[in-house]
Image (spheres, grey):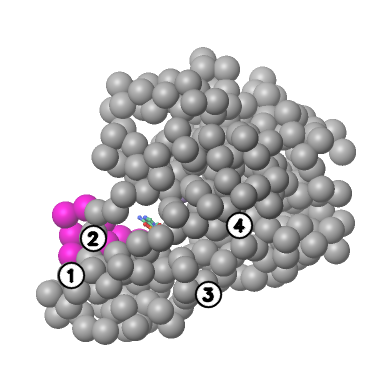
Amino acid sequence: MELDAQLNADLHCHSVVSDGTLTPEALAARAKAGGVQLWSLTDHDEIGGQQRALEAARAQGLAYLTGTEISVTFAGRVVHIVGLGFDHESPEMLEGLRTTRGGREARAREMAASLAGVGIEGAFEGALQYVGNPDLISRTHFARFLVDAGHCADVPEVFRRYLTEGKPGFVPHKWAALKDAVGWITRAGGIAVIAHPGRYDFTPTEEYALITEFIGHGGRGIEVVTGSHTAAEFAEYTDTALEFGLLASRGSDFHCPEESRVDLGALPPLASRLTPVWAELADRIHH
Ligand code: AMP
Ligand code: MN
Ligand code: MN
Ligand code: MN
């Protein structure tokens, strides 16, 4: 396997262990069917699915990198940091993620109380019905409940009307610190990657601060081709990766066959002038 920019690597997706709807095994099969050559399961704040994903990938003859997507609070905003190729038994990583997950249930109860204030009753119990991992109740589970209960037509509409800053159901939350998330990943032998940078609505100054602080803490990668970016953003973040000397990553951010815009393995490749993150992770790949 040539670890170049052409490789069909999909290093970002979610299973029932966080807010996806498929099991790690079903995702491995779907990745294989979609032509993926190197895969990673990156559940939010949780690596409880890694052993299953690793074994399912092996059964499919699919190369695998361990993964996670850590929720970080940076400058009062939420930023996601993907970790790739780390030791999934690292005690420091396990403890850090456990702490990051803590408080999700209390937050969910507050979200439900806020929704009850606008006449939507039973949202906590409703969202729980969609949760695969009781430790990881997320806004996505609330969104699925609000759609199925007839409050909104689809998940994007839920996020436009509810659950986001200034809207009913939004509850601010303090996630991990950038320095800690990058440190857990790096000290466990992996590479930290800024997830979907185009999604944050940062000013150029704020984005510069994020990238330089991230690099200062030992972060080395950035997602360029992701299901969360437009084609114009693929080009924009190709330039960003080159400008800052960051390794480029690629991943669909697949959550659910009915919800996700991009399927596993279906994105265009990285530009050949980029250095892919997987070129630096050869010895971390499970075959
Ligand atoms: P949480 O970690 O509980 O704050 O939930 C964040 C998750 O909500 C993200 O990982 C996405 O899966 C989902 N999400 C956030 N914003 C949107 C949006 N505008 N449309 C669809 N899904 C979204
Ligand atoms: Mn998600
Ligand atoms: Mn994300
Ligand atoms: Mn994601």
Badge 2 is on which residue?
Answer: 170
Residue plotted at (49% across, 26% down): 217
The image quadrant that residue 103 belongs to is: bottom left
Badge 3 is on which residue?
Answer: 132
Circle 4 Cα neighbour tier, 10 Å, few/some/many (<14 / 14–19 / ≥20): many
- The reply to whether residue 29 is visible in this rendering is yes
Decide: is 54 above or below 126.
Answer: above
Q: Identity of the amino acid at label 1? A: Ser
Q: Is residue 198 magenta?
A: no
Q: Identity of the amino acid at label 4? A: Ile
Say which mark, if any, is on residue 47. 4
Q: Secondary structure at mark 2?
A: loop
Marks 2/1 in contact by CB < 8 Å: the verdict is yes
Q: Secondary structure at mark 4?
A: loop
Q: Identity of the amino acid at label 3? A: Gly
Say which mark, if any, is on residue 114. 1
Decide: is 204 above or below 71.
Answer: above
Q: Is residue 157 magenta?
A: yes
